[in-house]
Image (cartoon, rainbow, N blue to C red):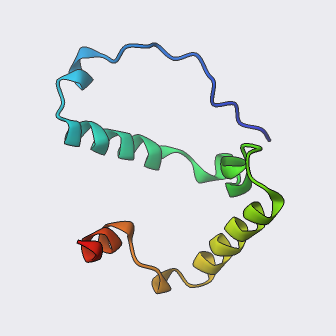
Amino acid sequence: MSVDWRIKMPNTLPPEILKLSAEERLALVDLIYESIDEDAFSRAERIDDGKMLPNQQAELERRFAEYDANPDSFIPVEQLLAEMK
């Protein structure tokens, strides 16, 4: 299944959204993203935009498989960023 992200969307946001702070809008984006049904399309379809070389695609799939096998061995990006400060 191929996903076409070039759907026609209005180029303005509802006034209610524009009244939100940047932080609130980012939280809204996160909620919308999290609401997408992961079964709607596979990881490969989400990441295959035709711009990756086969070895890059293979490495990404390897990393996904590693995470799926042991998610507790990874740290959240927020923790990583905090540790970098």
Residue 75 picture location, percent across and down: 40, 78
Q: Is residue 29 above or below residue 15?
A: below
On the rendered structure, is 83 left or right of 60?
left
Who's the residue at 31% across and 67% down the image? 78
Q: How many callouts does the rendering have?
A: 0
Residue 3 falls left or right of residue 14: right
Residue 20 location in percent, x, y?
18, 30
- Please tell me which residue lies in front, 8 or 60: 60
Give the quadrant of residue 60: bottom right
User: What quarter of the picture does the C terminus occupy?
Assistant: bottom left
Q: Residue at x 71, y 54 (%)?
A: 42
Q: Quick one: quadrant of the N terminus?
A: top right
Left or right: 78, with 67 as reference point: left
Residue 8 picture location, percent across and down:
58, 16
Residue 44 vertical position relative to residue 62 in the rendered view, above or below: above
Question: At x 38% / y 71%, what residue is drawn?
Answer: 76
Q: Is residue 67 left or right of residue 25?
A: right
* Image vertical order of residue 72 relative to residue 59, above or below: below
Q: Position of residue 57 (x, y in %)?
A: 75, 61
Q: Residue at x 68, y 56 (%)?
A: 43
